[in-house]
Image (spheres, rainbow, N blue to C red):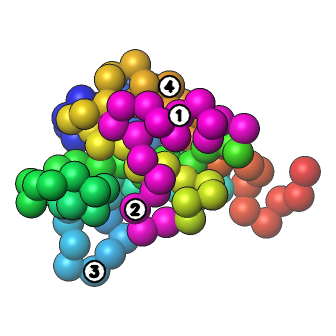
Amino acid sequence: MTRKEFLEYCLDTYGTTPDFPFENDFETAVLRHGNNCKWYALVMKVSRRKFGIESDEVIDVVNLKLPLEMFGSFGTAEGVYPAYHMNKLHWVSVILPDAPNDVVQFLVNASFEATRGCPKGKKP
């Protein structure tokens, strides 16, 4: 899956568009819930070397938050790694060009649900 396809999937499925919260960085995109502003995806450019792959190629990666019970199932899926630059107990990194589209869609759906929560300032 390409970055463009991933962002289109998120727009079509959740109605969310990326924002770019990091000053002078227009490559790293965050996808958030509209009601509580929680991140459900972080899209960035990362070297394959960061994942132990012998290559300097810079690729599109998306970090997704998963429920703990899912880690055993997807921690070893093709293109899925412990999170780069985030809490490895709650997040995974998915190398977009390597992971099967159905795995990417399933994981982003899980991340969206895991971060749904309640609106800011409101308690359940």
Q: Measured from the top left, where is residue 32 in percent x and y?
A: 50, 52
Give the Cα separation between the discs numbered 1 and 3: 33 Å
Taking the spot 55% from the left edge, 60% from the top edge, the residue there is: 88
Q: Image height check: is 30 above or below 77?
A: below
Give the Cα separation between the discs numbered 1 and 4: 10 Å
Q: Nearer the viewer, mark 1 or mark 3?
A: 1
Q: Nearer the viewer, mark 4 or mark 2?
A: 2
* Mark 2 crowd level (few <14, some 14–19, many ≥20, 10 Å Cα): some
Q: What amino acid type should be assigned to the residue bearing mark 2?
A: Tyr
Q: Are marks 4 and 2 in contact (CB under 8 Å)?
A: no
Q: Image height check: is 36 above or below 116?
A: below
Instruction: Tell me, yes or no, whether the highlighted magenta stretch contains residue 51.
Output: no
Which dot marks residue 84? 2
* Mark 1 crowd level (few <14, some 14–19, many ≥20, 10 Å Cα): some
Check disc 1 and report the residue beneath it: 74
Mark 1 or 2 closer to N-term?
Answer: 1
Q: What amino acid type should be assigned to the residue bearing mark 3?
A: Glu
Q: Measured from the top left, where is residue 115 in percent x and y?
A: 65, 48
Check disc 4 and report the residue beneath it: 106
102 relative position to 64: left or right = left
Q: Nearer the viewer, mark 3 or mark 2?
A: 2
Which region of the structure is painted magenta?
69-86
Q: In what element is the residue under mark 3?
A: loop
Check disc 3 and report the residue beneath it: 23
